[in-house]
Image: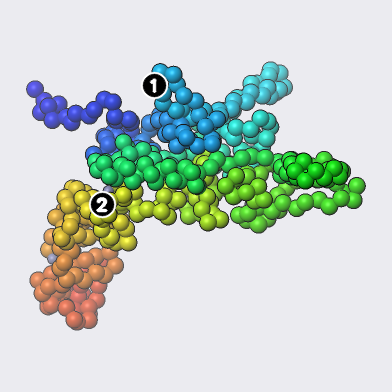
Amino acid sequence: MELEKEAKKLTLGHEIGSGAACLKCKDKCEGFELHFWRKICRNCKCGLEDHDVQTTSEEDKKVGRLLEDTKYSSLIAKLKTDDHPLYKRNVVTLTSPVSAKKDVDIKTITYEWAPPVPSQIVAVRYIEMLPKAKQPVFGTEGAVYRKKQMARQLPEHDQDPSKCHELSPNEVKKMEQFVKKYKDEALGVGDIKIPEAVEMQVKDKGANDTGNKSTKTVVGAMGDGASTGQKKTIYCCYHCKLNMKEGDPAVYAERAGYDKLWHPACFVCCVCSELLVDLIYFWKKDKLYCGRHYCDSEKPRCGGCDELIFSNEYTQAEGQNWHLKHFCCFDCDCVLAGEIYVMVNEKPVCKPCYVKNHAAVCRSCQDAVDPEAQRVTYGDFTWHATTECFQCSCCSKCLIGQKFMPLEGFLFCSVECKKKMKT
Ligand SMILES: [Zn+2]
Ligand SMILES: [Zn+2]
Ligand SMILES: [Zn+2]
Ligand SMILES: [Zn+2]
Ligand SMILES: [Zn+2]
Ligand SMILES: [Zn+2]
Ligand SMILES: [Zn+2]
Ligand SMILES: [Zn+2]
């Protein structure tokens, strides 16, 4: 009988992504296993989105839920069976015969998402105006980028209390109110339009409203603006302030008003500067935000579990907010309130874990240097700042407070000792 087999850990089969390989850590991760309250893998500490998981249907549920009870409900469908709103993601597959010398090659390209506009030409032109590495083409780095941004910008624990860890009934209530408020006041989905066409629409509307029967102004898009001597409207991007190229699609945001428009590549979050995934934006005080950064601008977020904090009791440490129970060691999860901790890569670690996993080793005695201990660091080497450890490698004279000569990790009190050691 093999001991190893008996010691295997049990993973719940229904957990999303369970056992999936980590694309970042490769063999170092035994497979995705969800930490019981952090939103990361217990094995390698990367996110679910870094693991090889097909999360598309979960994403479509998440976005479906986000757009439920908003004016964008035309983008979702309700399944009769379970009443769960599902995002009707616009997947576009283009097939174009490419004629080579002899035979005809069929080239197929699938966009995992494209703006839901009536004209496929406009949709594709929009995508082509994005940086190549961010175009959501199936099987490319652009599709991976979209998937990551989907997880990063729209965390499901920012909208669904059931995805949060042990909320009190009062916290659930506060969260539901918060979600309703942002759906009513900030959330929107960008619109792809040709600026010249928008202007005509607005003019049409204006003419009807005022009863003004004067002829419509024909602008640039019609190609005769210059010849008829009429002024062409110059459209400029709200983000980069540069002009739009005539006839190219632009992004509009209803919350911002139709007097503002963006280059497709400029429709980004004002905090993280990433492309707003699937054009889902939050508008606040004349700025565009992604979901995560809009929520961050309204509520504190726990540095431990990544959830927004709806309880009045929380703590601030290291420039971040924390649920009291989540200010824990990143390595062993012990609670750190009132304990000594060390920050490692912006994560708190308890003293025993620090000594075990991260502490520098004394060049002289080879023991870990306690985080509270006095030390001397020179180049890549660290020593205990004690008579026993920080001494001349030749004559053992203590070098604390003395001049010393380092040589490949050895210390010398004088040229003489250095010479003796070399021979
Ligand atoms: Zn990993
Ligand atoms: Zn992992
Ligand atoms: Zn721009
Ligand atoms: Zn952002
Ligand atoms: Zn927390
Ligand atoms: Zn620990
Ligand atoms: Zn030492
Ligand atoms: Zn010496």
Relative to 421, say whether 173 is above or below.
above
Q: Amino acid at mark 2?
A: His
SS of the residue at dot 1? Answer: loop
Dot 1: few (<14), some (14–19), or many (≥20) neighbours within 10 Å? few
| Percent of width and height locating residue 220 | 80, 45
Foreground pick, 138 / 171: 171
| Residue where numbered disc 2 is placed | 323
Q: Specify the quadrant that holds the C terminus.
A: bottom left
| Percent of width and height locating residue 159 | 39, 40
Q: Residue at x 69, y 17 (%)?
A: 103
SS of the residue at dot 2? Answer: strand
Q: Amino acid at mark 1?
A: Asp
Relative to 251, say whether 238 is above or below.
below
Marks 2 and 1, how far apart in space?
Answer: 34 Å
Decide if residue 152 is on the left or right side of residue 330: right
| Residue where numbered disc 1 is placed | 82
Q: Which mark is residue 381?
A: none
Of circles 2 and 1, the one toward us is 1
Relative to 378, say whether 196 is above or below.
above
Dot 2: few (<14), some (14–19), or many (≥20) neighbours within 10 Å? many
Q: Is mark 2 within 8 Å of ligand 5?
A: yes
Decide if residue 200 is on the left or right side of residue 299: right
Q: Specify the quadrant that holds the N terminus.
A: top left
